[in-house]
Image: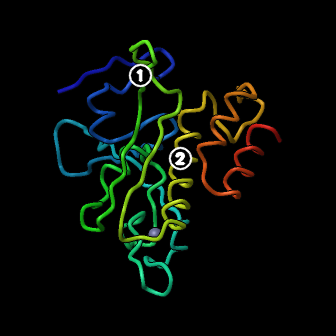
Amino acid sequence: MAKAKLTSKGQVTIPKEIRDYLRISENSTLKFEIDDMENESRSVILTKEVVKEKCPVCKGDGSIQNGTFACFVCAETGEVDVGTPILLYIYQLPLRKYEVAISTIQHKKRSDGQIYFLQIPEIEINSDKYPKELLDHTHDYLYMRLIKEYAPKSINNSSLFMLPADIVLEEIIHKLKTDDAKKTVTRWFRP
Ligand SMILES: [Zn+2]
């Protein structure tokens, strides 16, 4: 059982094991429900609000090109969970079923053998089943979500956002595969 102390402002730090269990991170919305079962001790149920949006890869259809390809990004549901950190989201997808491999690269080795962590993890998608164009589009969607999560401040509030140096931005843009994504991300950082 995890415990946490309430501050004078009514704030509490949710213990890491609970955050991991609920798969919540910064900006997740939590729900508090009073457990109204007849009970001597008052208790509240803490859950994560699941925020879903239409799958940007299949546009909500669950499949691509009139059913030719099952959409693995939303596992054919037509919706993606945007409240879960993207690396966890990827981990939960039944990728084996779709014969798709997604690997994430979080650190690299310098020429002198030293390991360094990437500011924004990189993504690689491999599949013999899906067309390259579709995999590129999917890569950019996932990588853009990673940029949003790993960039220092919220992208939705440009006044808070720490702008990367030109050389860093160039590296980020270089990793994107489609022109649309390159344009969008450039606009995020250089409005
Ligand atoms: Zn989809």
Q: Closest to the observer: 80 or 171?
A: 171
Give left or right: position of 52 versus 151.
left
Q: Is mark 1 within 8 Å of ligand 1?
A: no
Secondary element under disc 2, as helix, strand or loop, is helix
Q: Closest to the observer: 77 or 1?
A: 77
Secondary element under disc 1, as helix, strand or loop, is strand
Nearer to us: label 1 or label 2: 1
> Which picture quadrant has residue 165?
top right
* Vertical arrangement, residue 89 with respect to residue 72, above or below: above
| Residue 148 at x, y percent in the picture | 59, 40
| Residue 91 at x, y percent in the picture | 31, 49
- Residue at 24%, 61% (x, y): give it: 96
- Find disc 2 in the rendering and name its residue: 143
- Find disc 1 in the rendering and name its residue: 109
Give left or right: position of 171 versus 58.
right
- The quarter in which the N terminus is drawn is top left
- The quarter in which the C terminus is drawn is top right
Mark 2 neighbour density, 10 Å: few (under 14) some (14–19) many (20 or more): many
- Residue at 47%, 23% (x, y): give it: 10
Give left or right: position of 78 versus 14.
right
